[in-house]
Image: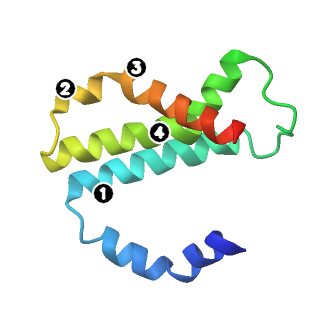
Amino acid sequence: EGDELDLLENYDKIIRVYNTLPLQMRKVISQITDEMGNGMADYVARDLRNGTVDQKDFSKYCHIVAGTVGDGLTRLFAASGLESEDLIEKVELWDSMGEFLQRTNIIR
């Protein structure tokens, strides 16, 4: 359906572009997609219509679906030289922003 079908139909193009990226950027993308995919696998079979079990579980879910994106972007910007590598260590910044964005998506 929709975006997922578009992604699958254009997968060859995505891989072609991915393979042109510098090695450090490919490593970041691979690590983040692995973490996100494995984390989402923990939730895929669960019925989340009524939310998560508790606040800790909700924070974990938000980290998986949004905090990993913040982690990945931070590491990509650092790898490109556009930002300081010191930002990578500031987990509270990118992870809390990810949780905030996911909460916003949920209440929309």
**Which residue is located at x 41 percent, y 74 percent?**
14
Secondary structure, mark 2, is helix
Secondary structure, mark 3, is helix
Mark 4–mark 3 Cα distance, whole angstroms, equals: 12 Å
For marks 2 and 4, the one nearer the N-term is 4
Mark 2–mark 4 Cα distance, whole angstroms, equals: 17 Å
| Res 78 label | none
Mark 2 in CB contact with mark 1 (< 8 angstroms):
no
Assign the C terminus to one quadrant of the image.
Answer: top right
**What crowding class fits label 2: few (fewer than 14 Cα within 10 Å), some (14-19), or many (20 or more)?**
few
- The outermost residue toward the front is 108
Number of callouts: 4
Mark 1 in CB contact with mark 3 (< 8 angstroms):
no
For marks 1 and 3, the one nearer the N-term is 1
Query: Which residue matches tag 3?
Result: 92
Query: Which residue matches tag 2?
Result: 86
Query: Which residue matches tag 1?
Result: 26
Secondary structure, mark 1, is helix
Q: Which amino acid is tagged 3?
A: Glu
Mark 1–mark 4 Cα distance, whole angstroms, equals: 15 Å
Query: Which residue matches tag 4?
Result: 68
